[in-house]
Each structure stands twice: as structure tokens, then as C-alpha cells.
């Protein structure tokens, strides 16, 4: 794929389907067979792109996992790296994130400096993204690993200011993240205020576990939904279809 194509495809999806659904495969948590089977079924079930990565990974065979996922699907495969060690030429693009809600220089700039030469060597498309951790009422892996405070869920104004800073810094997207398996997802009000305050798309993930929730986040102003954990609990194709259909607000079938 030529550079820029993955991001452009995401934007077209938002325009044409009303919202994009990204399936997150964490190679640590999926059995290898189960991850591949999800990747194989993803396009047919309405998924728009596959993300691979984790804030903390025991898997030492990340590149091989991405290669196998890539060969199982025609969808774009985007790395969602928890560290520069999760970069591989086997993907189409990388969500080049900076954890802008935190004040830990490692995740604001250091990982990026270590990763940049690899991104160049691997010829990966970069999607510069302001990654914002939002309080979810329980301690999440990303909060623990990054050692950063999340933005309080009752303070959408703070989220807005961070998101606008990301836009002014030239980032292409912001990601409102409650953390994988979060007990509470990012509040609708925060999504609504943030998405109407900035001109770049908002991605929302963490703890989304029903089609209704996905639909509400899109209605609030999210452009993209990321789902991982709940599909590990219920990997049925029916459930995946329900999630993607709820996200594609322009394609809702009225009976
Ligand atoms: C995690 O936002 C993603 O970074 C997805 O979260 O695993 O809870 O769906 P879940």
C-alpha cells in the first residue's frame, strides 16, 4: 500500500459508513488459532481494519503474529504499539501515538525516537495520533505500565484542551482510551465535547462490550471504534457482525 492510503481508507469509511470499526488483536491474549480465525472472518463480518498490539506484551514472536494475521485478511493491518519493540515490516501502517494525557517523557517522546528509524527502515505508513488515557474507575494495564494519570472522566474540558493541542501539533487523530477491559468506557459527554471542539477524527476504545455502546459512541461523535477484549470473551461471528453493524450508522437497516 502506498503511504497515506490506510489513513485515507479510514476517512472514506467514516464518510461512507458513518463510522469505522477496528478489531484489536492482542497476540498475547488470543490463542494463535483464535486470532487468525478472527482475522479471516473480519472482512466478511464488516470490520474496517485490524489493529495488532498491546500496552504490555509477553509474546516474543510479535512480527510472526502480525505476518500471519496479514496473510489471513485483505484488510489494512495497523500496529498499535505499546513500545518500539512492537514494530515490524509485516504491517501496513503504525498508529504513531504519543501519550499526550500523561507527563511521562518515555511515552510522550522517547519510545517514538527509538521507533522512528525502524518505521523508516520498515517503510511503514504512520498515522500520528494523540493518545489520551481516560479514567475508567479501575486500574488498567496501560495506566500501570505508562505510570501516568488518566484524565478524570468528569473533566471533558481537560480532554478538549489536550485534543486541541494534538490537532495544533499536526496529529491526524486523537484516541480516547479507557484501557483494555475497562470497567467503564469513555463517557459519551466527553466524546461529544471533544469531537465538536476539534477538526480531526476521534477514535474511542476500551471496555466497549455491546452493539448499543458502539452505536452510542458513534452518535456522540466518535469516528472510529476499537474493540478487543469483549471479542476475546465472545469470538462468535454473529457478535462481531452486531458490533460492526452498530458502528456503521449510515448502513443501519430499518425493518
Ligand atoms: C485497548 O481500546 C482498546 O487499547 C480496546 O479495548 O480490549 O477493552 O476492547 P478493549
Image: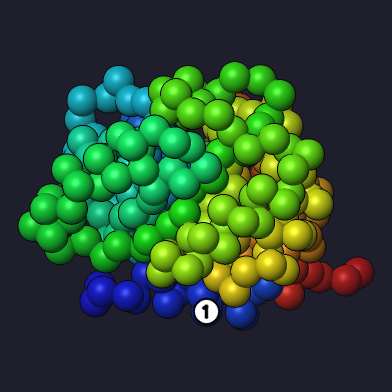
Above or below for 117 versus 171: above
Point 60% across, 28% down: residue: 181
When asked about the image quadrant of residue 18, the answer is bottom right
When asked about the image quadrant of residue 60, the answer is top left
Which residue position is annotated with label 1?
Answer: 12
Residue 30 position in % (x across, y down) = 43, 29
Q: Nearer the viewer, residue 233 or 131?
A: 131
Q: Quadrant of ligand 1?
A: top right
Q: Horizontally, is 210 left or right of 28 in the view?
A: right
Regarding residue 234, the answer to whether it shows in the image is: no
Point 39% across, 48% down: residue: 98
Q: Is disc 1 placed on a helix, strand or loop?
A: helix
Regarding residue 127, the answer to whether it shows in the image is: yes
Point 72% across, 52% down: residue: 157
Q: Horizontally, is 47 left or right of 95 in the view?
A: right
Q: Quadrant of the C terminus?
A: bottom right
Amino acid at each position: 500500500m502506498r503511504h497515506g492510503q490506510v489513513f485515507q481508507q479510514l476517512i472514506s469509511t467514516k464518510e461512507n459508513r458513518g463510522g469505522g470499526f477496528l478489531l484489536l488483536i492482542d497476540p498475547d491474549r488470543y490463542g494463535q488459532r483464535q486470532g487468525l480465525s478472527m482475522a479471516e472472518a473480519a472482512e466478511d463480518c464488516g470490520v474496517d481494519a485490524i489493529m495488532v498490539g498491546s500496552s504490555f506484551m509477553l509474546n516474543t514472536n510479535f512480527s510472526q503474529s502480525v505476518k500471519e494475521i496479514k496473510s489471513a485478511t485483505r484488510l489494512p493491518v495497523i500496529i498499535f504499539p505499546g513500545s518500539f519493540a512492537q514494530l515490524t515490516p509485516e504491517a501496513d501502517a503504525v498508529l504513531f501515538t504519543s501519550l499526550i494525557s500523561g507527563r511521562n517523557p518515555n511515552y510522550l517522546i522517547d519510545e517514538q525516537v527509538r521507533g522512528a528509524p525502524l518505521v523508516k527502515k520498515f517503510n511503514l505508513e504512520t498515522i500520528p495520533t494523540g493518545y489520551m488515557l481516560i479514567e475508567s474507575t479501575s486500574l488498567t494495564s496501560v495506566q500501570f505500565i505508562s505510570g501516568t494519570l488518566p484524565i478524570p472522566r468528569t473533566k471533558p474540558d481537560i480532554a478538549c484542551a489536550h485534543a486541541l493541542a494534538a490537532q495544533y501539533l499536526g496529529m491526524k487523530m486523537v484516541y480516547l482510551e479507557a484501557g483494555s477491559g475497562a470497567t467503564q468506557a469513555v463517557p459519551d459527554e466527553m466524546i461529544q465535547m471533544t469531537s465538536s471542539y476539534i477538526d480531526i477524527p476521534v477514535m474511542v476504545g476500551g471496555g466497549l462490550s455491546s452493539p448499543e455502546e458502539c452505536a452510542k459512541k458513534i452518535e456522540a461523535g466518535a469516528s472510529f471504534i476499537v474493540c478487543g477484549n469483549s471479542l476475546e470473551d465472545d469470538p462468535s461471528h454473529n457478535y462481531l457482525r452486531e458490533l460492526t453493524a452498530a458502528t456503521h450508522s449510515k448502513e443501519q437497516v430499518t425493518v
